[in-house]
Image: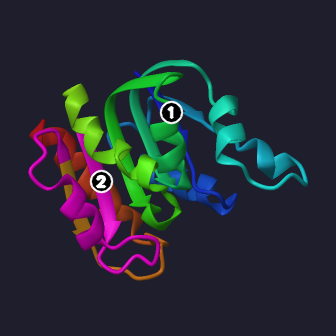
Amino acid sequence: MKILAIPGKMPATKAWLEKIIAQTPWKHEEITLHNFSAWGSDDEFSVATEVQSLPCGHFDVVITKSIGTLITLKAQRKISWDKLVFIGVAWSLYSDQDKALLPALDNQGKPVLIIQENHDPFGSFQEINQVVSGKKCIKCIEVSGERHQYADVEQIGSIISNWLESL
């Protein structure tokens, strides 16, 4: 199984994402943990640059957080997946055109899980759920929080594991 893990903008989210994956059935799988090119330079973070720096190809799973969700959506010509997990969609960073990409995932017919804090400052559960509600392949799960940190890695791992069992 090939897994692509795309962290959030901050380097600390790389270790956080590893902890999340360790709580799932994927903990022993081949994981490509993406490093943003902006982390190794003084360049300003650029979504377009990061899309270009992603590895090409098909993955069994793509799991991502925050700005990584937008990068994933914009990289659909470069990467594909069988299952997709978004944690903390950074909705306020999406343009109107970008926002149309999220519900359009349903057209692919592949399972998508979104985990969103109820009061995430980048986009609340209610905002995200309103956009994907009624979609056949997209499931949006609410967790408590208001800081875009998703600190309860055990809970998130459990949500992902339960979702996988339901497929």
Point 55% across, 55% down: residue: 67
Q: Please say whether residue 120 is one of the residues in the magenta stretch.
A: yes
Image quadrant holding the C terminus, namely top left
- Picture coordinates of residue 84 (x, y %)? 34, 38
- Picture coordinates of residue 29 (x, y %)? 44, 29
Point 42% across, 59% down: residue: 89
Within 10 angstroms of label 2, few (less than 14), some, or many (20 or more) residues?
many
- Picture coordinates of residue 76 (x, y %)? 46, 28
Residue 23 in view in this figure: no
Q: Secondary structure at mark 1?
A: strand
Within 10 angstroms of label 1, few (less than 14), some, or many (20 or more) residues?
many
For badge 2, the amino acid type reads Ile
Residue annotated with mark 2: 114
Q: How many marks?
A: 2
Q: Read off the magenta span.
A: 111-138
Query: Which one is in front, 25 or 55?
Result: 55
Image marks 1 and 2: residues in contact by CB distance under 8 Å: no
Q: Please say whether residue 36 is one of the residues in the magenta stretch.
A: no
- Picture coordinates of residue 98 (x, y %)? 44, 48
Point 48% across, 54% down: residue: 65
Point 81% across, 56% down: residue: 44
For badge 1, the amino acid type reads Leu
Q: Quadrant of residue 156?
A: bottom left
Residue 41's place in the image compared with 153, above or below, is above
Q: Is residue 152 left or right of residue 115?
A: right
Residue 153's place in the image compared with 22, above or below, is below
Query: Which one is in front, 32 or 56?
Result: 56
Residue 4 tag number: 1
